[in-house]
Amino acid sequence: MAPAFRLSLKAKVSDNMSHLMVDFSPERQMLQALKFLPVPSAPEIDTLKCLVADNCVTVVWKMPEEDSKIDHYIVEYRKTNFEGPPRLKEDHPWMVLEGIKDTEITLSGQRFDTRYMNFRVKACNKAVAGEFSEPVTLETNAFVFKLDPTTCHQNLKVEDTSAEWDAMGGKVQEIKTREKENKGRTASPVHSPARSALQSPKRIPSGRSGRDRFTAESYTVLGDTLIDGGEHYWEVKYDRDSKAFGVGVAYRTMGKFDQLGKTSASWCIHVNNWLQVSFTAKHNNKAKILDVPVPDLIGVYCKYDEGQLSFYNARTKQLIHSFRAKFTQPVLPAFMVWCGGLSVHCGLQVPSIVRCLQKRNSGTSSSTASLT
């Protein structure tokens, strides 16, 4: 304590040193002015006010009792395929959102490639964070599929959700086929690759085999997930340089020589940029000219049970064309591209505006009278 009591003058020494004292009153006032913040209570997520629509999730919560000391909230969420409370082990990690001032948050532009999402939230004051709320699980169903490479034309290069024209694809495939045939002739019957393939065939979701892939001038590829009920929506972006492009749905029994829209087993809209530019709707070898600008992003809506297939400008949600059909088999997303490329955007919910437009136009059929 000596350095705190140095005196510039020599102190007068006495037996009891009563003339010296330490004044702690300022420190005492400071200690008495301290206020300790309590740990915030766990918030409560209001599931009735939570909303999942248009690939957006809105989560709303409240405090069990009013707390004016709350500074912000922290929300954590993760994707899952399991209903009910979160599991300890999951493929998807918790994502963290910090510094939320309101008692709700909206996650927009989500890709719903899982069936559910888990959410939990905790409150924080300037001193400490409280416990997490009871987690909730919200359903996020959407239509998810990939392009099926076992169905695609040899001149199409397919990777998950994209297809690109490959002029040399067919020739390369012919060379590989000949090499396999030559190897099969020299191999012993027991270890023949052809025999092994027959003994353990690879089943694919579309129900087609590699031998049944599209060929000749049917530059087509199908999706790998059947539609046999409900309503679904996906979007397609194609290269503007493509000489020809088509998008729609088809039965999996569509012939490998059949072109999209030129058979009773397929419905599509078709863009032709070669020689003469045209934009048409096609079904059963009948075509109807579409007198609207060709959008760079096309939305496809399919309500299987009612036989509705509609195409939209995905950016403006303007209706391009609607088919009315009586589907007698499950259908698959179908695509055609020649000298170009396309990419598919799936994991999308049916946009609210599309659903409203479908209800409004449910009594009209003039746009499809020439094709149904």
Image (cartoon, rainbow, N blue to C red):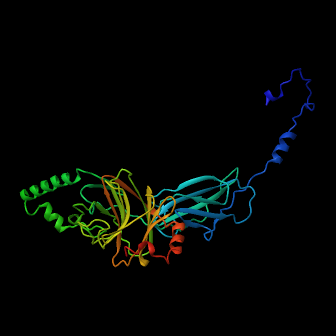
The residue at the point 18 percent across, 52 percent down is: 171
Say which of 272 and 67 sits in front: 272
Residue 113, image x and y in percent? 44, 62
Residue 218, image x and y in percent? 26, 62
Horizontal arrangement in the rendering, residue 132 relative to residue 216 (left or right): right
| Tag count | 0
Say which of 7 and 260 sits in front: 260
Q: Quadrant of residue 356?
A: bottom right
Q: Quadrant of residue 372?
A: bottom left
Horizontal arrangement in the rendering, residue 40 relative to residue 18 (left or right): left
Q: Quadrant of the N terminus?
A: top right
Say which of 283 and 239 sits in front: 283
Horizontal arrangement in the rendering, residue 177 relative to residue 217 (left or right): left
Residue 232, image x and y in percent? 44, 69
Residue lying furthest top in this view? 9
340 relative to 350, above or below: above
Say which of 67 and 185 sits in front: 185
Residue 32, image x and y in percent? 83, 48
Horizontal arrangement in the rendering, residue 193 relative to residue 312 (left or right): left
Q: Quadrant of residue 14?
A: top right
Can residue 227 be seen here? The reply is yes
207 relative to 124, above or below: below
Can residue 113 be seen here? The reply is no
